[in-house]
Structure formats: structure tokens, C-alpha cells
Image: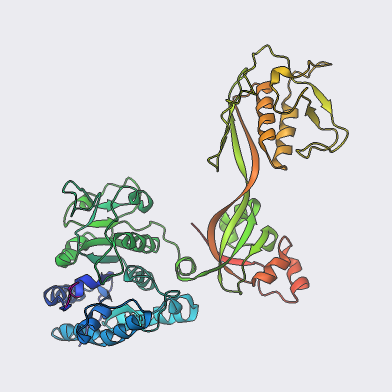
């Protein structure tokens, strides 16, 4: 009879890959000693009052042994058949081992479709919760029999991270055939150094080796474990990579509880104790619904917004919801309550640096293209160079879209001419040209800044003697997050740019004044 977990216990997910369950070569014998060690560890964790979930691979490997085959084949139907043969024997293997300790288990088979549907996701969540409350150990695997490439999790590392988010796990242990993450492949480089604590997964990707591709039967590797760690830590789960042969080290790792995740926090225990790699959980994890939208749903389309809308949805009082007034356009075909990418449309920022008497350089903040001021057609001009000639435009003929009565530089030859080649002023210039330059910058913000426009800004900066100037150039689009559409793509396209009060008038109904809800930022 299973005992119910004690209040205050931790929720722990343990993931075993195929290489930890069966040998990678024929006849694919099960690793009974290792599996027995895992079972004893899990039972001990249960006795200490913790809740445990096992994410187990190995169905195809067990199926190969049952059918006395040497290879799993390349066809999808053959792999699915082997998974169907092996899954029953795999769960029977787990049941036989746990039955020695009178510990009940339960089998849960999931597909991506189960996670993407909100109702089915909540049903799975409730089932996990009830099983753990009853003192039962859920054993999770992907339902390979019905999964196809379009709806597969890809590997059980990802499935374990999703399972961790569903049960709000405190720890996710990824058991593998190496003790931790290394700066290089330790099998080839004896000088490879272990990475014991990871606070920034993006940074560690550039510092460590992820060349391990898994076993001949497995589908994962070290790169997939980094993806799993990224998913799990975002949900508030501390993720640990460790060797499956040292599964008893779990007790030493969780002994100090959940370590803090703040940058610079001194926690001596992190670099001591069992050799492993800890990925520290986020201090402020995203909530369950936003995590589900971000990582559980397939992105069906794109909603492009303006910068004003981006500022609005970042405010706390907005509830990360998007009004139709901020929508610029819609891409793709999607239904309501499907996930959509949120992309902001904004101007590129061009930073002009330089001083009086020099041609300043221009740096594009969001592009690798830049102009360094070395063009021979724009030589440096001395401080004593005459100021540029000003005239008032009477027609809207400027390529930069300047309106009437806007002061305009009038070079003798072309916009690309040197500042020294401009005609002398026919009349006195006001002491401070600041209003003129400000007006020009505002005009540039409303026009496409081509190469001639860039050179014009050069000349303006030289004439003004500014050390730093910032203007806006061409449009760019940047993905900033993901959200849940409240209307379909056609409906959002019809009401884009409008006030919420016009939704019912245009569509004939109004379910929500927002077009996208529960936006999470990347």
C-alpha cells in the first residue's frame, strides 16, 4: 500500500534515456543493475516524503529485443510497431522492479497534441496531481505508436521538461552517460573541465561541447538536454545533468533544498558535493498558462505591432494583452485561440559619432551594415569651413519627403558632395541651428534613409559640430514574444488599427476587446 507524500516534500522528475535502460548493441539486454538502483533511490525518496515522476525511454529498444532484430529500421511504421511491442514489456519491467517494494506505478503516454489542446493539457495536469497525491509513481513516455514527426516532442529530454512544468517540479534530473557538462568532449580531450553551475544557458552554449549525439538507439544528446534545461528552468525547475550510474547522488544534490538563482549569489554548496551540472531555476518563472502558450503550442501565424503597442503591453496594468489599435498587419492563417508570434515593427537607430571639423561615423544599432565616414567623396572639413547654405523649400520635391517651409541644405553638386563644396551663405545664419537639425531628424524619422540620406546626416552633424547624434533609418521587424489569438487572422486583419469600440460594429460581435492575450516575451 502506497503512503501519501508528506507536506512540504519536493516534486522530482527523473528522466532516463534509452542507453540507461538497455544496452546500445544487440541483443539489447536491459541494465537491470542500474534500473534496480534507480528504483531503490525512488522508493527512498518517496519514504522521505518527496513526490517522484519517472520519464522513461526504451520502448523501441525493448521491442527490438523481443523481436530479435538488430536494427529498428528507417520507416516510421516499423518504429511505431516496435514501440507498440516494447512499451508493454517496458512498463512490465518497471512494475516488476517496483513491486518488490510494494510501490504502485502508473503509465502515462503523451503526444504533442495532448499538450497543445488546453483541455487535454489540464486533464493531464489533473491526472498527474491525483496520482502523486495517492502516492503513485507516474512513468511517462511519448506515445510513439501514434506520434508522427510533425507532432513529436523530438526526444524525451523535451518531454521530461514539459512533464516538469505540468507537475510544477522542484528538480528535473536528466540521467545520461556522462557525469556533467564539460567544456569539451571528455572522451576525446582529457583536459576538458566540468561545468558545475549554469545561470545563463545562452552563454554556456558558446562555452561547452554539445557534440555528443546520443547512442545508436537514443534520439537525444547534450544539445537536447540544454533545450530541456531551458524549458524547465523557465518554469521554475532546477535542472541537473548527472550520470545514471550515480543516481544515489540525488540525495546529496537535493539535501540543501532549492538554490537561489540570482546572479552573483554566493552559495558554497553549488560547487561542492556530487559532480553534476546544475541549471538554476528562474527566480521569477513565467506562470503556467504563459508557459503552456510559449512552449506547448504550435505557432500558427504572426501579428505585427507598432512600437507604441509594445510599450503598452509591457506595462503591468495591460495584463500583457494587445488591443487592435496597435496591430500593423497579420501574416499567416490561424484560428482564434491558436498561438501567434508577436513581431514589433520599428525604425533602425543610426548612431552618429564625431566632432566639429570631422566627418562623423554612423553605426546602425540593429544591422551589421555601417558607414565609417571614409568615403573619399566626403573628406574632412576644417573648423573654419563656411556653414551650409539654407533655403526654404516651396515644393514637396525632396527625396526625403520634406514638407514646404522646411529648411533644406542646398549643395552645389549633389547630396554626396563635400561640405567644403557648398556655396557660402547668402545671408546670416542664426547662432544656433538646433531647431533646424531637430526638424531634419524628425523628417528623417518619417522617411527611408538611403545612402544619400546618410551622407546628408553626415554633413548636418559636421555643420552642427555635434559629437553624438541619433537618427532613425529603415524599418525592421523583430520577434518579441508569443501570445494567444482571441480572433482569427481574417478578423484581426479587418480590425487592425481600430479602437476596441469598433470591433462589434465591424465583426458583428465582440468576444474580447483584445486581439491577443497572455503574451510572453522571449
The correct choice, above or below, for 387 with respect to 90 in the image is above
Where residue 161 sits in the image (x, y, percent)?
35, 68
Location of the N terminus by quadrant is bottom left
**In this image, 304 relative to 11: left or right?**
right
Pick the front one: 289 or 409: 409
Q: Residue at x 75, y 28 (%)?
A: 436
Q: Residue at x 80, y 29 (%)?
A: 407
Question: Which range is magenta?
Answer: 22-26
Could you say which quadrant of the image residue 400 lies in? Answer: top right
In the rendered image, is residue 9 in sight? no
Task: Give the main secondary structure, helix, strand or loop, of the magenta stretch.
Answer: loop
Farthest residue in the top direction?
384
Residue 505: horizontal and vertical position, in percent?
Answer: 78, 72
Residue farthest to the right? 394
Residue 71 seen from this side = yes
* Most foreground residue, 296 or 511: 296
Q: Is residue 430 left or right of residue 115?
A: right
Q: Residue furthest left?
A: 33
Q: Is residue 397 magenta?
A: no
- Is the residue 344 above or below the residue 165 in the image? above
Q: Horizontally, is 520 left or right of 510 in the view? A: left
Determine whether, in the image, residue 45 is placed left or right of residue 106.
left
Q: Residue placed at 36% from the left, 61% from the top?
A: 227
Residue at point 77% right, 71% down? 506
Estimate the x, y position of residue 389 in percent, counting from the top left: 78, 21
In this view, 30 is above or below 278: below
Amino acid at each position: 500500500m502506497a503512503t501519501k507524500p508528506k507536506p512540504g516534500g519536493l516534486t522530482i522528475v527523473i528522466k532516463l534515456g534509452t542507453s540507461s535502460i538497455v544496452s546500445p548493441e544487440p541483443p539489447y539486454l536491459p541494465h537491470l543493475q542500474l534500473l534496480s538502483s534507480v528504483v531503490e533511490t525512488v522508493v527512498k525518496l518517496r519514504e522521505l516524503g518527496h513526490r517522484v515522476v519517472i520519464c522513461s525511454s526504451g520502448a523501441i529498444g525493448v521491442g527490438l529485443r523481443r523481436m530479435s532484430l538488430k536494427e529498428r529500421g528507417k520507416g516510421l511504421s516499423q518504429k511505431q510497431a516496435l514501440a507498440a511491442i516494447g512499451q508493454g514489456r517496458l512498463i512490465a519491467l518497471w512494475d516488476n522492479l517496483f513491486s518488490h517494494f510494494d510501490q504502485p506505478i502508473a503509465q502515462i503516454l503523451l503526444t504533442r497534441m495532448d499538450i497543445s489542446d488546453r483541455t487535454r493539457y489540464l486533464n493531464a495536469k489533473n491526472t498527474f496531481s491525483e496520482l502523486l497525491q495517492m502516492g503513485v509513481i507516474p512513468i511517462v513516455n511519448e506515445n510513439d505508436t501514434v506520434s508522427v514527426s510533425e507532432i513529436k516532442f523530438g526526444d524525451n529530454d523535451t518531454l521530461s521538461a514539459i512533464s516538469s512544468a505540468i507537475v510544477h517540479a522542484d528538480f528535473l534530473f536528466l540521467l545520461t552517460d556522462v557525469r556533467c557538462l564539460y567544456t569539451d568532449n571528455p572522451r576525446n580531450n582529457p583536459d576538458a573541465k566540468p561545468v558545475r553551475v549554469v545561470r545563463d544557458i545562452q552563454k554556456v552554449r558558446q562555452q561547452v561541447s554539445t557534440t555528443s549525439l546520443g547512442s545508436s538507439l537514443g534520439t537525444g544528446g547534450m544539445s537536447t538536454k540544454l533545450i530541456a534545461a531551458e524549458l524547465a528552468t523557465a518554469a521554475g525547475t532546477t535542472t541537473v545533468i548527472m550520470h545514471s550510474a550515480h543516481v544515489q547522488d540525488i540525495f546529496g544534490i537535493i539535501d540543501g533544498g532549492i538554490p537561489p538563482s540570482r546572479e552573483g549569489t554566493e552559495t558554497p554548496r553549488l560547487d561542492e558535493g556530487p559532480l553534476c551540472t546544475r541549471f538554476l531555476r528562474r527566480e521569477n518563472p513565467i506562470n503556467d498558462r504563459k508557459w503552456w502558450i510559449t512552449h506547448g503550442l504550435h505557432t500558427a501565424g504572426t501579428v505585427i505591432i507598432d512600437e507604441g503597442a509594445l510599450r503598452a503591453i509591457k506595462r503591468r496594468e495591460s495584463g500583457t494583452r494587445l488591443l487592435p489599435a496597435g496591430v500593423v498587419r497579420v501574416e499567416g492563417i490561424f484560428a482564434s485561440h491558436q498561438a501567434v508570434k508577436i513581431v514589433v515593427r520599428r525604425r533602425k537607430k543610426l548612431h552618429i559619432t564625431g566632432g566639429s571639423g570631422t566627418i562623423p561615423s554612423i553605426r546602425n544599432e540593429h544591422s551589421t551594415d555601417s558607414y565609417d565616414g571614409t568615403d573619399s567623396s566626403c573628406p574632412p572639413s576644417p573648423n573654419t569651413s563656411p556653414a551650409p547654405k539654407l533655403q526654404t523649400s516651396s515644393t514637396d520635391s525632396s527625396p526625403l519627403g520634406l514638407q514646404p517651409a522646411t529648411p533644406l541644405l542646398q549643395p552645389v553638386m549633389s547630396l554626396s558632395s563635400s561640405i567644403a563644396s557648398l556655396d557660402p551663405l547668402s545671408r546670416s545664419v542664426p547662432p544656433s541651428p538646433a531647431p533646424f537639425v531637430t526638424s531634419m531628424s524628425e523628417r528623417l524619422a518619417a522617411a527611408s534613409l538611403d545612402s544619400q540620406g546618410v551622407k546628408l546626416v553626415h554633413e548636418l552633424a559636421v555643420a552642427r559640430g555635434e559629437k553624438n547624434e541619433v537618427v532613425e533609418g529603415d524599418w525592421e521587424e523583430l520577434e518579441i514574444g508569443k501570445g494567444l489569438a482571441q480572433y482569427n487572422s481574417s478578423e484581426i486583419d479587418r480590425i487592425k488599427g481600430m479602437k476596441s469600440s469598433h470591433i462589434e460594429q465591424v465583426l458583428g460581435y465582440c468576444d474580447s476587446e483584445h486581439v491577443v492575450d497572455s503574451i510572453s516575451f522571449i
